[in-house]
Every structure is written in C-alpha cells, then in structure tokens.
Image (cartoon, coloured by chain):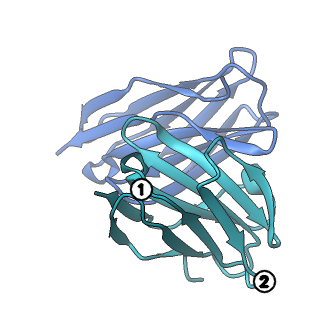
Chain colours: A cyan, B blue
C-alpha cells in the first residue's frame, strides 16, 4: 500500500497570504488528522476529519480550516498567514478510530512565512 | 495537562547499548503510543499499548505501562546508529491524541 502523501513538501509564503496544503491518506483509511510542529510548541493537534466531517478540533484560531473529500483526501487552509505559522505541518491517517488506533504520518509540508 | 512528559529530553549512547526513555502523564488514558521521528520528517508509529496492557514487544523495542504510576517506558535494546531520532509518547485521552515534547536519542557508532 502506498503511504500517506502530502503536497507540496516545501512552501514559502509571505505574511498575509493564504495557503492550502493537501494530504492523501492510505487507501481505505477514513480518518485524517492534521498537526503543526514547531520547535517552541512541539506537536500540536489541529483537527481531525472522518467521513468528510470534522470530528475534533484543537485550539487554533479560525484562520486554520480544513476539509475532507469523499475519497478521504484532505486539505488544510491557513488564511492571513503570520510569521508564527512557519512550521512543519503533518497529516496522519487512520483506518477508523482517530486517536484510538495507530496513526500513519505523511512526510509533512514545511511552510516558511516571510 | 493531557500532555505526556518525556524523560530525559536528550540521551546519547554508544552503539550496542540499551536506551530507555520514560513518559509520565497526569490524566487517565485509553491507550499510549510511541512514535519515532527522524530529523524534520514524518513520524513513524512504533507501538500502541492499551490501558489494560502492561508490556508489549516489537523486535528490539519493549514498552511498559504502569497506569497506577501514570508512566510508560520505551526500551530499545542493542541500539544502532540508525536509531538516532526523536521519540515521542502520545496519549489518547478522550478523542484526541496528544504528543509529548520528545526525547532526542543519539546513538554514536
């Protein structure tokens, strides 16, 4: 089986712009979670989608949003980018249970905001 | 806090030695997972141990869970240079998976 893929792998944006990141889960997995990783805050949970519905959400401002399509692919959008949004964004898929089962992570998208 | 706290923050050993990392937490959990991350890359799932389990093995990895002490440990036996990575414990409490800050393991050849 192909693993979790994320595109793009690297991205440089300017403060104030918006960005969309994409994640394709492992075939058959219906749960997709997003995490932000920074040196200062570590790994923080953004949100989880299951069968096109947001099932759980972390403590991030409304500038961070996401969606999931019928084929389980997910996108994450950040509007009005700030310098502090520079991070590694990781997507993880799971068969059904979200945090109750092992999650399979993609390689991440490295976002740099200048 | 739901977050696990790993100890030590950094560990440097010689190839062939064993490495032990600990994770302590404060809330009740459904399960606890360990992940590895090579520098700046995605996380790799290592082991999931459920709250009613005390020990699990996977190859050179051994994980223990003591729910009375709210702690878990990850033991890597006969370490290799390729084991150099950050190791994270992740707690499932409620419907969210929460990661600790990780232990940076360096295995010197």
Q: Do labels 1 and 2 share a chain?
A: yes
Residue for badge 1? A88
Which of A105 and B35 lies nearest the eye of the viewer? Answer: A105
Question: Residue at the spot x=45%, y=64% of the render?
Answer: A108
Could you say which disc has been placed on residue A70 in the image? 2
Q: Is residue B59 visible?
A: no
Q: Which quadrant is the N terminus of chain A positioned in?
A: bottom right
The percent position of residue B85, horizontal first and vertical second, equals: 34, 47
As drawn, the residue found furthest toward the top would be B69
Number of residues whose C-alpha sits closer than 10 Å to that of mark 2, classed few (under 14), some (14–19) or many (20 or more)? few
Image-based side of A52 in relation to B19, left or right? right
Image-based side of B62 in relation to A100, left or right? left
The chain under label 1 reads A
Pointer 1 or 2: first along the chain:
2
The percent position of residue A72, horizontal first and vertical second, equals: 72, 78
Q: Which quadrant is the C terminus of chain A positioned in?
A: bottom left
Could you tell me how far apart the alpha carbons at marks 1 and 2 are, in whole angstroms? 26 Å
Question: Residue at the spot x=37%, y=62% of the render?
Answer: A110
Q: Are marks 1 and 2 in contact (CB under 8 Å)?
A: no
Q: In which quarter of the image is residue B92?
A: top right
Which of B35 and B13 lies nearest the eye of the viewer? Answer: B35
The chain under label 2 reads A
Could you say which disc has been placed on residue B8 in the image? none
Q: What element carries label 1?
A: strand
The percent position of residue B109, horizontal first and vertical second, equals: 16, 45
Which of B28 and B54 lies nearest the eye of the viewer? Answer: B28
Q: Identify whether A7 is placed above or below A18.
A: below
Q: Is residue B83 visible?
A: yes
Question: Residue at the spot x=77%, y=32% of the render?
Answer: B29
């Amino acid at each position: 089986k192909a693993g979790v893929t994320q595109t793009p792998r690297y991205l440089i944006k300017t403060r104030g712009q918006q960005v969309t990141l994409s994640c394709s889960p492992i075939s058959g997995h219906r749960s997709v979670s997003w995490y932000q990783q920074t040196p200062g805050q570590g790994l923080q949970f953004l949100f989880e989608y299951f069968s096109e519905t947001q099932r759980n959400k972390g403590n991030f401002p409304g500038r961070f949003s996401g969606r999931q399509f019928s084929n389980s692919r997910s996108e994450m959008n950040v509007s009005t980018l700030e310098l502090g949004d520079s991070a590694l964004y990781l997507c993880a898929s799971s068969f059904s249970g979200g945090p109750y089962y092992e999650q399979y992570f993609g390689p991440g998208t490295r976002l740099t905001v200048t | 806090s739901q977050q696990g706290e790993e100890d030590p923050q950094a560990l440097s050993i010689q190839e062939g030695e064993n490495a032990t990392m600990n994770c302590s937490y404060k809330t009740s959990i459904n399960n606890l997972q360990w992940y590895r991350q090579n520098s700046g890359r995605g996380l790799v799932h290592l082991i999931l141990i459920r709250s009613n389990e005390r020990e699990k093995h996977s190859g050179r990895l051994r994980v223990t869970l003591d729910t009375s002490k709210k702690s878990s440990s990850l033991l890597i036996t006969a370490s290799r240079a390729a084991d150099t990575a950050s190791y994270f414990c992740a707690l499932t409490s409620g419907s969210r998976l929460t990661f600790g800050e990780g232990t940076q393991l360096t295995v010197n050849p």
